[in-house]
Structure formats: structure tokens, C-alpha cells
Amino acid sequence: MHRWACIGTGDISERVAADIAAESPGSLVAVWGRTRERAQRFAHTYGIGFATDSMSDVLTRDDVDIVYIATPAHTHAEIAIEALTAGKHVLVEKPLATNAADTRRVLNAAHASGRFAMEAMWTRFNPVHVEVRARIADGLLGEISGVRASFGTPFRARGRVLTPAQGGSILRDRGIYPVTLAHGYLGTPVRIHAVGAFMDGVDISGHSTFDYERGIAQLAWSGVQFLDLSATVSGERGWVTFDPMFWAGSSARVHAGSAERIFGEPEVIHYPREGNGYRPMVAGVRSALDDGLLEHPWHTHCDTIAIAETLDAVMAGMTADIAEDNPLD
């Protein structure tokens, strides 16, 4: 059994911790919080034996094998590198880092330490996505030529997404899911056009078109309005629609295989959600550790870096668009 520590006690940590405890009972052994009181409350809820506000007290424990990091995004890289240097494996809440350069630093540290590292992109482990990827690889849709995805919901009560100093970014908080979906089916785009809106120095919404040699991705994200929360992947033989919430949903509709499926009643793929939806990812991490892997084949280091580079390019495009609309005198 691989023993886990949680770094962070926020709402995401609570959901992931519950799934870690369900997938591998007794494996949560330590938690770090900004205050000892927060850590102790979290520990009491999830039956964790050790709670502290000292990072070193967690990372020097012999009974901690892997740490899940869910602190504000701007702290991810440094905490991950500290944990890897201390000999711990890491699962880091998305985004792994707030830019591609820091993403490379984390993954280079993982290679140097010989430890597993992965961005916690649960979509890649969602059973619906796993089955659709496998069937598309077997030729379900023929050559893939299109991805359409959007993720827009009004701001939740999380100040960090509005705070530049904490790496606040709706692109990296929500837009990362459409971008990751496009990368998964079409790869790295050859051209990117991006437009965004900013408030107090933080991007709050945007949309982008990715051009490929033989395809296109149309993506949108927002923290101030609802957008369609579904997504589609299309090819020469049909298309698949991932129902809301596309990044973590339990069903998809396959419009392929026959005229009836395409124009009439699509085939429905359905998998009931396991726990809070993170259990398949936790199981994937456990399996990779059991096999002695330093990265998971479903979300590799190369994948993570390529997506981080695309996010940087999208942000640069949005920033340039704002500058063009507001030229200096």
C-alpha cells in the first residue's frame, strides 16, 4: 500500500482525500494545512493520524510515499520540487505549474529524483473518456478532424481565481480542460488564435481556435457566465458528444457506426460515477507506482509540457489582443 499525504485542506483536497480513502482504506497518513487547526479538522474528518502546519514535518516522514498537492496554483511548482527532492512521489492539482518553464522544472526534478510525478488531470482517467479513446483508436470515427469544447460557470467563492499574486487564471483553472481535450485528439496546434477578457489583471473568460494541418478545435471558457458544458470529437465517420460536465461526466453519445446511429438514436456510453470522480485517477496512480513508472502513459510528462506550452501561447494571444484593442498613445 502506498501511503499518502495531503498538502492543502481546501474543497478539492476534501473531495480527492475522500476518494483516496475509499480507493485505498488507511492509506492517508498525514495532512498539511495553512494552520494547525485547519489541518487537525481535516485529519479528524478523514481519519488521518498526523496533522501539521509544517511542510518539512510532512516531507521528512518515512511513512509518506506520495503527496497530493492542492495549494494555490502559484505554489505548486516549488512545493512539488521540494517534495520530489525529499524523495516523495507527487500528484499535483492542475495546473501542474502556472507556465511551461516551471512545468519543465517540476518534471526535470522528478527525473532527477527518480520519483513519479503527474498533473491531476482526472479527465484522462474518467471511464467514459477511456472507452471513447480506445474506440476512436480502433477506428470508430476514422481520422479525427474536429474538437469542440467549452467550460463556463460563474465565479465560485474562491478568491484565488481572481488574484494575480496567487496565479489566478480562468484559462488555467477551466480552459485547461478544453485545451487538454484538443491535445488528446488532435495534438499540438500549428496556429492559435485567442481572444480573452481580463479583470484586475486576471483573465476571466476567453475563446480560441486551434488550427491543425487537417483539423480544427474550437474552445471557450469563462468564469463569469455559463457556457455549454458538453464537448464533441468529430471525424470522417461521425462524432462523439460528451455530456455535461464533459471533463468529468458519466455519459457520452456515439453518432457513428450506422445511419441510424448518426441521424437517429446514438449509442449511449454510460459509467456511474465512482465516489467524487477521482477514484479512477487514484487507482491509475497506484497502478503506475506498483509498476515502478515515473509517469503515467495516459497523461505523460510530454503531454503535460505540450499542454502548458499551448496554454502559454493562448495567454499570450489573449494578452496581445487586449493590447491591440488598447494601444498606448
Image (spheres, helix red, strand yellow):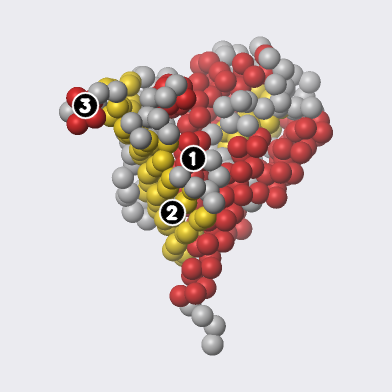
Label 3 packing within 10 angstroms: few (<14), some (14-19), many (20+): few
Q: Are marks 1 and 2 in contact (CB under 8 Å)?
A: no
Q: Residue drawn at (37%, 55%), measured in percent from left and top?
A: 224
Which of these two is toward me, 276 or 106? 106
Label 2 packing within 10 angstroms: few (<14), some (14-19), many (20+): some
Give the amino acid at mark 1: Leu
Give the amino acid at mark 3: Ala
Q: Which residue is mark 1?
A: 186
Q: Position of residue 185 (x, y in %)?
A: 48, 36
Q: Which residue is mark 2?
A: 209
Kindly indicate the quadrant of the structure image that contains residue 77: top right
Which of these two is toward me, 100 or 81? 100
Mark 1 or 3: the one toward you: 3
Q: Residue drawn at (43%, 34%), measured in percent from left and top?
A: 143
Kindly indicate the quadrant of the structure image that contains residue 26: top right
Mark 3 or 2: the one toward you: 3
Q: CA distance from mark 1 to mark 3?
A: 25 Å
Judged from the image, the secondary structure of the residue bearing numbered disc 2 is strand
Taking 75 as reference, is 157 left or right?
A: left
Taking 216 as reference, is 49 left or right?
A: right
Judged from the image, the secondary structure of the residue bearing numbered disc 1 is helix
Q: Are marks 3 and 2 in contact (CB under 8 Å)?
A: no
- The vertical placement of 90 against 284, above or below, is below
Give the amino acid at mark 2: Thr
Quarter of the figure that contains the C terminus: bottom right
Judged from the image, the secondary structure of the residue bearing numbered disc 3 is helix
Q: Position of residue 25 (x, y in %)?
A: 56, 13
